[in-house]
Structures are given as structure tokens and as C-alpha cells.
Image (spheres, coloured by chain):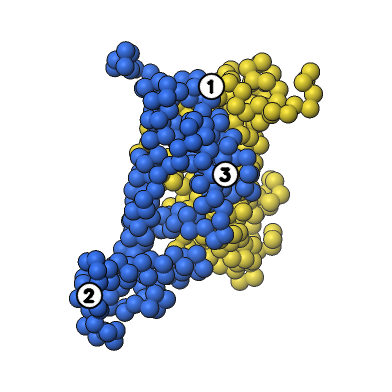
Chain colours: A yellow, B blue
Amino acid sequence: MSSPPPQGDEPRPVPQPRPGGRTARIRAQVLDAVRAELIEHGYDTLTMDTVAARAGVHRATVYRRWRDLGGLITDLFTAAGDLDWHPRDTGSLRGDLTALNQEIQDSLIEEPSIAVALIAVSFRSEETAQALHRLWEDRYIQSEIIIQRAIQRGELPPHTDARALLIAATAPLYHQLVLLRTPPDPHLPHHAAASATLAAHAGAFTNPYPTDSTL
Amino acid sequence: MSSPPPQGDEPRPVPQPRPGGRTARIRAQVLDAVRAELIEHGYDTLTMDTVAARAGVHRATVYRRWRDLGGLITDLFTAAGDLDWHPRDTGSLRGDLTALNQEIQDSLIEEPSIAVALIAVSFRSEETAQALHRLWEDRYIQSEIIIQRAIQRGELPPHTDARALLIAATAPLYHQLVLLRTPPDPHLPHHAAASATLAAHAGAFTNPYPTDSTL
């Protein structure tokens, strides 16, 4: 992985302060090129060669490291999941869910939207579907802290189904903006967060069979 | 439209009891073929010619009537919207939303699922995206009767935002089954309906600025 390609015309790399620097730089160049190609031209015309050319990286390197388009797309999802992301702490359940929804809405309505491009690509193969599934799993697990904080504040009962509540709060955004394709509503992040919060306070996401009611 | 194709080898059609019978039959054959091809092979290999061959209809007829793949797909969505569909009347808001969600879940998890195939196709062009948007608009308008009945029963205040409530109830199913691709949960139709109902009873979907509070 770290040796230069056999017929390389690049200068021998200068030793980097941190190991893997050149490998990481090439990965960033290649994934940037995949993103740009997806956004500008879509998946239909995406090839390993157009990506290599746009990234300014040897074809041999791209083929050796990512094997095929499925490998490239999967790594793109992995890189998106690697970002050191944490949900905002606003001091209330409704505030936290609104902030989360605002981030989601922003990512879905920006032009061009890499988030929508990745969702579209996820319908193209089982491999890309699984890659998006893993990325979303990570995001929902990272978001569970919102529910834990609300439980610690006494805002929610301890046996709250964090995942069900997070999905109730966020699903209307994806449904309206990605599937129904309705025009963006600036109030939607707040409204969806507020209605999920009301439902949660009314006990909608409380595990009906707590194993220990004294917890 | 009703004249036989120029080089047809079919017998001249016998006059039908209702006008348009032959036209309607050809449309049904062709759209059945589109559905079957989409489900079995996906959009990538779909062509006007494979559809015509599978339907047993002259290529010239298919090209004249539907022009191109976009025309075929758009007509497929239109046909889905033409079905005389009405949401079930179970006597309660939660019951009606659960029945609606059960229908949605069944359509999304059946193998193969034409509903999921149509959603996947909607990401392939602006034309197919708009066709799905129109179909969903029709479905949500048809479903508003659920909210109207709940208002008439006194279960909901008159100024309830029917669309927002319907989306809160149904979005988790599409999100989990189509986007997150989590395994089907047999309790999800009921849970999503119940939490949207709790939120509605708590006033989550009430228009905050009723124009006439005596209504």
C-alpha cells in the first residue's frame, strides 16, 4: 500500500512527519473525485478511470487499492462515518432534536447534496445499500446520547426506546425531502422535533415491559 | 391510438363492448411487462424492446404510445395512482393509522416489492422523481379522510394539520424499510401509528394560529 506504483512518474515521496500521510492524502484525493463525479454526473457515468483522472492519481493505484466501483463507494461511506461527529447539546430534548434535524435538513437541501447522491447510489447494488446501512447505524448510535441526556435530566423515563424516538424525530425530514420531494419547509426541523418530543413525554417510546421498575 | 399498427400481424380487433377495451388491454399488458422486468432485472437493463417482447405487443405500438422509457415509467406511476384505493375505517384514529401502516409495510416487505422498485427508479431521472411525487400526493390526499373522521368523532381538534400527522405516522416505515434497510419489525405499523396518535392528542399537529377558535 505505501510503496509507489511500479511505473510511477511522481518524485519519490519525501518522508512524512506522520506515517501513512501519503496514503491518506491519496485516499482524500480519490474520494473527493468520487464525490465530485457523483454530484456532477451521477453514478451512471462513474468509472474507475474517470475517478483516477480527476484525482490525478495513477490508475494502477486506484485499481490496486479499491478494486472496483463498489470498493470506491463503500470507502466513501466509510469515510463519511469516520468524521468525528457529535450531536449538539442544547440543554433540552426538543432543542437537541431540532438541532439534529436542522443539520439533516441542511445536508439534504444543499445544492448539490452529497447526502442525497449517496442515498441515490445506495439503490444501485446490495453492496452500496449495506454501506449506507452501516453509516446510518453509526449515526443513530452516536445520536443516542441525546436521549441519555434527556433521561439524566429527568425529562424522559429510563426505559425509553432511544432508536424509535430518534427515528420518529428524523424520519419526516428524509421522507419529505428525499422520497416525497416536497419543497423544503424551514419549520420542518422544529416541528418534527417538537411532535416527537410531545409523543415521548406522553410515553410513546417507553418500553412497555420494564424489567426493573425501580431503575 | 385505436388504429392497428401499420405492419400488424394480429387479426383486426373485434369491436369491444366498451370503447377503448383493446387500448386498455394493451396498456395493461405493457405495464405488467414493465413491472415484471423492473422486479426481475431492475432499471439498468430495461429497454422499450424488452418490454414490447415480454408484453407480446408490437414495438411500433409501444414506441408510438409511450415514446421512451420515461413515458413508460411515468405511465406506470399514473396507473398505480388510478387504483380505486381508500383507507380502511376502523373507528379510531390509531386503528386507521395502524391499518394504513400495515398496508404500507406489506407493500414494502413483499418479495419482490414493486413499491421499492418504483422508489429506486424515482432516483434515476427528474421525470421519474416527479411521477412518484404526484403518486404520493394523491395517496396522502386520499388518506386525509382518516384525519377528517377523527375530527368528526371529536378525537382531534378541527385545526389539525392532516398532512403533518399522516407523515409522522407513516414516515418511520419508509425510513426504516427503504432507507435504513433494517429488518422488518411486525410491531412497527402499530408503534408508529400509536406514537403519532399520542403526539396528535397532545396537540402536536394543531395549527397554532386557528383563524376561528369557535369552530
Q: Quadrant of the C terminus of chain A?
A: top right
**Viewer-closest of B9 and A29:** B9
Left or right? Give the position of B210 relative to B34: left
Does residue A8 appear in this view? no
Q: Residue at x 38, y 30 (%)?
A: B148
Does residue B95 appear in this view? yes
Quarter of the figure with residue A129: bottom right
Determine whether label 1 and label 3 are within 8 Å by CB.
no
Determine whether label 2 and label 1 are within 8 Å by CB.
no
Furthest-top residue in this view: B214
- Residue on which the image places disc 2: B15
- Given the image, on which type of amino acid does mark 1 rest? Leu
Query: Helix, strand, or loop for circle 3?
Result: helix
- Given the image, on which type of amino acid does mark 3 rest? Gln
Q: Which mark is residue B176?
A: 3
Q: Quadrant of the N terminus of chain A?
A: bottom right
- Report x, y in % for residue B54: 42, 76
- Judge whether A154 appears above or below A110 on screen: above
**Viewer-closest of B92 and A114:** B92
Q: Residue at x 56, y 67 (%)?
A: A59
Q: Which mark is residue A147?
A: none
Query: Helix, strand, or loop for circle 1?
Result: helix
Select label 2 or label 3 by which is in front: 2
Q: Which mark is residue A198?
A: 1
Q: Earlier in the sequence, mark 2 or mark 3?
A: 2
**Viewer-closest of B6 and A197:** B6
Select label 2 or label 1 by which is in front: 2
- Given the image, on which type of amino acid does mark 2 rest? Pro
Q: Residue at x 57, y 53 (%)?
A: B109
Label 1 to label 3: alpha-carbon separation: 21 Å
